[in-house]
Image: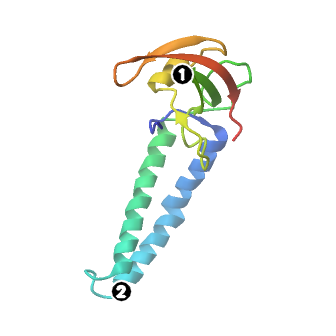
Amino acid sequence: MTETAAGFLTQEAHDRLKAELDQLTGEGRLEIARKIEEAREEGDLKENGGYHAAREEQGKMEARIRQLTALLQDATIGETPPDDGVVEPGMLVTVEIFGDKETFLLGNREIADGSDLQVFSEKSAMGSAINGKSVGDSTSYEAPNGKTIDVKIVAAKPYTG
């Protein structure tokens, strides 16, 4: 489960996302406009695959621009948390749920860009239940289906990417 709601970002993730946004809103928009114009000059737009592909690419790019703008506007930027065993955003957390161990990043999925690491927002049900707890602590939270889930914090280390 990943959350798209804004939350904690490391300074490095914030800077990377800001650079991506700047590229998309500047050079990216100019490039897609050029592609659309070139395809438009080829003639009949109904059967112009290049035109439709460029317009689809433009739509995806504009959606990413909106996503990045909202994320950067609402994010809390901070440094990587200290290695003190206390769960907080930016930590790689291992919990025990139903007798199984599960490891995930607490924070925003953009911090773990390019990895297949599972991410929970600190605003999610589990994230808010474990945020501020220490290794060895047990807590519970209510799942979306209404069931109470018991969780024990097994490990909490700063995520270094």
Label 2 to label 1, Cα distance in Å?
Answer: 59 Å
Q: Which residue is mark 2?
A: 41
Callout 2: few (<14), some (14-19), or many (20+) C-alpha neighbours within 10 Å?
few
The residue lying toward the viewer, choosing from 141 and 30, is 141
The kind of secondary structure element at disc 1 is: strand
Residue type for callout 2: Glu
Can you say whether 119 is above or below 17 in the image? above
Q: Position of residue 7 (x, y in %)?
A: 51, 32
The structure residue drawn at horizontal position 48% and vertical position 48%, both measured from the top left corner, is 68
Q: Which residue is mark 1?
A: 97
The kind of secondary structure element at disc 2 is: loop
The structure residue drawn at horizontal position 57% and vertical position 48%, both measured from the top left corner, is 17
Can you say whether 61 is above or below 89 in the image? below
The residue lying toward the viewer, choosing from 77 and 157, is 157
Q: Position of residue 61 (x, y in %)?
A: 44, 60
Q: Is residue 157 left or right of residue 22?
A: right
Residue type for callout 1: Ile
The structure residue drawn at horizontal position 58% and vertical position 21%, both measured from the top left corner, is 96
| Residue with the most extreme right position | 83
Q: Report the colour scheme.
A: rainbow
Can you say whether 58 is above or below 50 in the image? above
